[in-house]
Image (cartoon, rainbow, N blue to C red):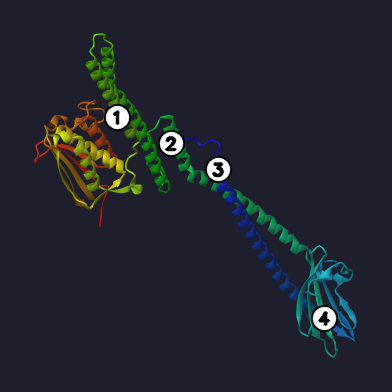
Amino acid sequence: MSSGQGAGYSLQTRLLLAVTLLLTAFLGLTGFVLDRAFRNSLETGVTEQLQAQLYGLLAAVDEDAGEFYVSENLREPRFSQLNSGLYGLISSPDQGELLRTQSALEFTLPATLQIDNPEGDLSRGETRFSRVVSDAGLIEYFQISYAVTWENRPEAIVFRVLESADSYLAEVTEFRTSLFSWFGALAALLLVSLLLLLRWGLSPLRRLARDLALIESGHAESLGNHYPTELSSVTHNLNLLIQSERKQQTRYRTTLGDLAHSLKTPLAVIQGEVSASAEPSLQHAERIERAAMVQEQLDRMNQIISYQLQRAVRSGAVGSLATQVNIKDTAAKICRALEKVYASKSVEFRQQIDARLLFLGDERDLMELLGNLLDNACKYGHGKVNVSCALVSNSPQRLQLIVEDNGPGIGQEDSDRVLQRGVRLDTLAQGQGIGLAVVADIVQSYGGRITVERSQMLGGAAISILLGNIRIQV
């Protein structure tokens, strides 16, 4: 199990970086919108203020003998202050400039400045607001113009009021400084809060890594149930994987132990036969008989090794990947083979199997199961074997498989022992010891149940098996 070292990236870092970029874009866009709204609001205020000052100038100006003059004090004192930043101008298209307020006596509009909305030909009674900007695009002045018809003059008289944009730019700068300061502090606070939330939200993953490390070091057996819903399926599957691995390790150890135990007696028999065959006085016929005995034990050892290896690699039921095996056909095939093997006993098989029943699993497991049960029945029975299989439950679907013989049977005191791992009546005997242990392993791997009883019909042993991994053929 990997400790997770050398990981290419951190989920927390990725999430924090993504949210930082998103937060930067969001706050930047929000700041841009607020700044634009603030500037528009300021300009609207400037427009209204200039319009009021324009009307004040218009009310204070009069004409005498073709000359314009200020007939009364202007309400806005800045008109009377030289270079105050607020300037009033009166002009006409034909005569040019006609009057200036005192504040504009030394005012000259720089030639490099541009008016983004020039006056052009103002219609009589039309008011126009414009900005005077520099080549760099900065606003230098705000201007409002108004064309009026003056008494008997044929041409329009244009009243203009200009105001320096210094106060406007100062307010914008102050607003931006305040805005960016607050947004910067807010962004920092949000990122710190987000970091804490990420650490808290991802803590189950760190706990999972620690628990896996404890399992790897042998300090824990499995993952607990204290994980959130999003990780429960992952931890459940990890626990299944860990349990499967440990079961497989246990199976390997058990198989090696059983193999060593099963080979003890054949090796002892071979050693005894080889030692006896070395006697000089041994007759030729006896030598041949002992050699046959050695060969028989060697064949038996080969069978034991093959059986144990097959059992060691068995992983249990295969679930959705299982194949469908007809139980009746498989049982009939095994019965035909056993009739030849036990021809000398003239074994009579009676088969009562529903032809619609299908076994969902490995065909070799079904053949191993039926083969061991029927072989034991033939070997220890007295010539009669009954095998039956029928559906006993529809919800859930379950079948019952029963193999009976007319032999001596298995005593009640031994019925549980023969099914236990590593506890058998006779490990070396070709019969109920190894065979029933194999059957019990297969049945357990498919989630079934096996019981050893006495046959009511034949009087011998009756092995009953309940399995749920079945299907009914339509």
Task: List the residue tagged with mark 1.
Answer: 303
Residue type marked 1: Gln
Which numbered disc covers residue 10? Answer: 3
**Label 2 amino acid?**
Asp
**Of label 2 and label 1, which has the lower sequence position?**
2
Sooner in the amino-acid sequence: mark 4 or mark 2: 4
The residue that appears at 37% across and 40% down in the rendered structure is 240
Query: Who comes first in sequence, dot 2 or dot 3?
Result: 3
Q: Contact (CB < 8 A) between labels 4 and 1?
A: no
- Which callout, 2 or 1, points to the residue nearer the camera? 1
Pointer 2 residue: 211
User: Residue 129, relative to residue 357: is it above or below?
Assistant: below
Tell me: 312 left or right of 207: left
In primary-sequence order, the first of circles 3 and 4 is: 3
Give the mark toward the camera: 4 or 1: 1
Amino acid identity at mark 3? Ser
Asked whether residue 378 is in view, the answer is yes
Is there CB contact under 8 Å for labels 2 and 1? Answer: no
Going by the numbered disc 4, the residue's amino acid type is: Val
Residue 270 place in picture, x, y as percent: 28, 18
User: Which label sits in the foreground, 3 or 4?
Assistant: 3
Q: Nearer the viewer, mark 3 or mark 1?
A: 1
Which residue does the image show at 29% across and 27% down from the upper left?
299
State the image quarter where residue 406 is shown. Answer: top left
Q: 82 or 205, which lies in front?
A: 205
* Tag 2 and tag 3, C-beta contact below 8 Å: no
The crowding category of the residue bearing disc 2, from other C-alpha atoms within 10 Å (few below 14, some 14 to 19, many at least 20), is: some
> Which element carries disc 1, helix, strand or loop?
helix
